[in-house]
Amino acid sequence: MARDPYTVLGISKSASEAEIKSAYRRLAKRYHPDTNPDPKAQERFSEVNAAHEILEDKDKRRQYDRGEIDAAGQQKYQSAGFGGGAGGGAPGGDPFAGFGGFGRGGAGGGRSYRFSTDGGGPSGVDEILREFMGGGARREAPGFGQAGAGGGAGAPRGEDLEVIVTVTLEDLASQDKLRVSLPTGRTVDVRLPAGAEPDQQIRLRGLGNESAVGGQAGDAILTLRIASHPMFTRDGANLKLELPITLYDAVLGAKVRAPTLGGSVNVTVPKGSSGGKTLRLRGLGLPSKTGAKGDLLVTLQIDLPHELPKDFVELMERWREDEPYQPRSAG
């Protein structure tokens, strides 16, 4: 015997539509057989769907509150000739008892549905679908489910799933797909769009939460966060790097190694380079929205040793006295 739908959903008889919907979603997620391995979850899930089927429909809810239908949605009284017995077309019998496939009790009785006269099939098709989706038959009836052709077209879709995905600059530079684990337990490979920006969203159709009533699944919406890098900073498609060099490399010129996202390369430091000079290494940045790669901007930073040689200090003193210069503009 079906339980009181208000008790099943854990709400009061004065509950609003929003409270009914909220309670249903919470319980449907908890007992959905795809996420709850407990053998009793399927039975509880079906019970929750049956309760929601009555309370979400204003007419059915009023009928239940007035005592006209029971917790299973069946009429408590019938007009003459349409009773709940097993007598077929006899007085007091169920003229649709032979259509047990649409009811709960088989050929011996149970719920019946009116048929339309326009060749369109049962007029209670939405209720049949809900019953199939709410019970164990959902998986065995692909024509009525999400995976079937046109299945669940009129049922509410599942909720979208919002996921924060933190990516590195190496991820943005790579041509490989990024592997993302969704809260549903599913793992997907995602290609990041060229020129991806912080907080940019990627929508994965049909990979969100399943519909509790057999509709299409929601979408998974990935929001990108870009992790800071210990060496590089981003400027659009360009990357910036501060590269320490020695004083003698700056004075005499040299080839030094510089890191990139794909490894290290040789950088030519021109003779007489000043600290703060920026060298542009073309094509070693990030992919842009146009597909072209940005550049790596290398800014030279002259790094002096902790202990300067005595003769070097003396040379600097003579230089300051004999050939002083002013790198800063006056005034």
Image (cartoon, rainbow, N blue to C red):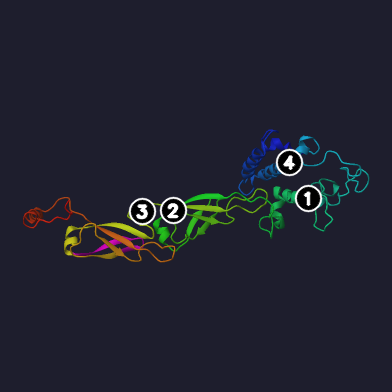
Q: Residue at label 3?
A: 229
Circle 4 or circle 1, nearest the eye: 4
Question: In screen coordinates, is 161 left or right of 173?
Answer: right
Mark 2 / mark 1, whichever is N-terminal: 1
Label 4 SS = helix
Give me the C-alpha separation between circle 4 and circle 3.
57 Å
Query: Which label lies toward us, 2 or 3?
Result: 2
Q: CA distance from mark 2 to mark 4?
A: 45 Å
Q: Residues within 10 Å of mark 3 (few under 14, many from 20)?
A: few
Tell me the residue that label 2 is attached to: 198
Q: Are marks 4 and 1 in contact (CB under 8 Å)?
A: no
Asked if the residue under mark 4 is in contact with the one under mark 2, i.e. CB atoms within 8 Å, the reply is no
Labels 2 and 4: the sequence-earlier one: 4
Type of amino acid under label 2: Pro
Q: Give residue 170's quadrant in the image.
A: bottom left
Tell me the CA gap for discs 2 and 3. Answer: 14 Å
Circle 4 residue: 58
Residue range corresponding to the magenta coloring? 253-264
Q: Nearer the viewer, mark 4 or mark 3?
A: 4
Q: Is residue 183 visible?
A: no
Q: Residues within 10 Å of mark 2 (few under 14, many from 20)?
A: few
Give the x, y percent position of residue 114: 83, 50
